[in-house]
Amino acid sequence: MEQLNIGFENSKSFLSYFGNFSDEITDKIIGISEFYLQQTSDVAKLKNKVSFLIAECFQNIVRHGINEESQGATNNSDYFQINILNDRVVLSSCNSVDNDLVGDIEKKINQVNSLNAEDLKKLYTELLSNGGFSAKGGAGLGLIEMSRKSGLPLKYNFIDKDGKSCKFLLVLEIIDRKNDVEQKVELDKVEKIYRDLLNQKSLIVYKGDFSRDTIIPLIDMLQLNFQKMKTTSASIEKRLIITAIESLQNVSKHGMLSNGVKEGILAISKNNSNYIIQIGNYISDKDYSALSNNLNNIKKLNPTELSSLYKKKLLDNDISEEGNAGLGLLEIYKNSNGNFEFEFVKTENNNYFFSIKITL
Amino acid sequence: MQILEKEATRETPKVILNTTTGVFAIEGKSFPENVNEFYGDILTTLNSYSQNPLSKTTLNLTWVYYNTATSKILVKIINVLEAVLLQQKSLVINWYCKADDELMIEKGEEFKELLNVEFNILFI
């Protein structure tokens, strides 16, 4: 679980996503990022710019990307990531493009990178009035707007080139111009994270606050992605969603508050026919024993004992004032047929980092 | 109160409780952070109806999915409605789901086995 955090140690929050890129998914990602940004005073003023640029990145992927689904590929490698750091927000996207488009995209990016703010504005107005639309409906305006709003040159690379296509990796750093103009993100590190996540067959990785306001858009995203991928049966999809809900609400309700947020990490990946859900969060020393005992006891149950305990708990009418039902871990066990592992790692301040890996 | 109606949200179901017909319907997703907050007035309405029920009471449930806290509230709802049986009135629970929705069929069967009421699993 800790390896999920590699590359993101300095992130206040991040969200990596592989899969379908629709307007609905864009809305969910914007919702999650806006919620986090408006609570994070240092980068709160970047909120509107970030939302605008997320939408622009997604449109870029949809407009220039090759739809792998329509070509029969089962593993969609189109990728988007938002990484919120102390003083800036970094957006990365990677999508397949036809080799024929590479020259044009490169030319446009180099052009916008060579211009200062005033010249960019001039070019933007010129293009708007001339309507210089490309064959795919873009006017080059997207890249100009990305550059204008981010405040720093666009970083890019074309990787994994074959005879027909390659992957277009684009990185935007969004800063508050008054504070800093130094570019800090290294393209090769972004590429490495992308490759690592792709190799892990990642669908989603999220680090940040696990409150109701982020759980709902996360669940919406998962559901939309499963539906669009059409590689998952409706029944498996529901088991996944329910297991994710129980795991996320477990963190939301029992996770330890740290700096005012219930921080955690969620990672969902697909390995052959199995889905793997991993969730990690901090818990206090006083909650450790009870949770550890509870999990160890559940692990020992055979299917008949599990079913009987589940039914007993279902009927016991015991719901706390906060709405806790005490059935979440049993539901996770049932849905995974007992395929879950957990770990507690003691932290420096004598609390614990609790992680659970569930295979469905 | 004759009709209690709630529109569906991203985390709560559509609810129509019509106490003049005795037909109650819950439909959609349910994973509110605190089930007590969402289902509190539903339980109150059903409790009050059960004191003086019609000859036939029907609860139609059509779930997309729900969390475990909702499943416990559902037991409470059914327990409240069971009061109509003590007054020699009828109670029918219809659990609607798709024929290929294994999970919701499984959940329906679990309730059917546990609860001592007329419980129909119906495919839509």
Image: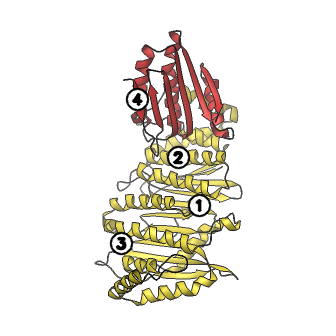
Separation of residues labelled 2 and 3 (CA atoms): 32 Å
Residue A99 picture location, percent across and down: 63, 83
Q: The numbered mark 3 sits on a residue in which chain?
A: A
Q: Is residue A10 visible?
A: no
Residue A278 picture location, percent across and down: 57, 54
Q: Nearer the viewer, mark 2 or mark 3?
A: 2
Type of amino acid at the residue the image marks with label 4: Leu
Q: Which mark is residue A87?
A: 3
Evaluate if marks 2 and 3 touch, with contact meaning CB atoms under 8 Å apart.
no
The residue furthest left is A178
Q: Are marks 4 and 1 on the same chain?
A: no
Separation of residues labelled 4 and 3 (CA atoms): 49 Å
Lower sequence index among marks 1 and 3: 3
Residue A286 picture location, percent across and down: 43, 44
* Quadrant hosting residue B96: top right
Circle 4 sits on which residue? Answer: B4
Type of amino acid at the residue the image marks with label 1: Leu
Type of amino acid at the residue the image marks with label 3: Asp
Letter of the red chain: B
Q: Nearer the viewer, mark 2 or mark 4?
A: 4
Separation of residues labelled 1 and 2 (CA atoms): 16 Å
Evaluate if marks 1 and 2 touch, with contact meaning CB atoms under 8 Å apart.
no
Q: Are marks 1 and 2 on the same chain?
A: yes
Q: The numbered mark 1 sits on a residue in which chain?
A: A
Letter of the yellow chain: A
Q: Are marks 2 and 3 on the same chain?
A: yes
Circle 1 sits on which residue? Answer: A203
Circle 2 sits on which residue? Answer: A245
Q: Nearer the viewer, mark 4 or mark 1?
A: 4
Q: The numbered mark 4 sits on a residue in which chain?
A: B
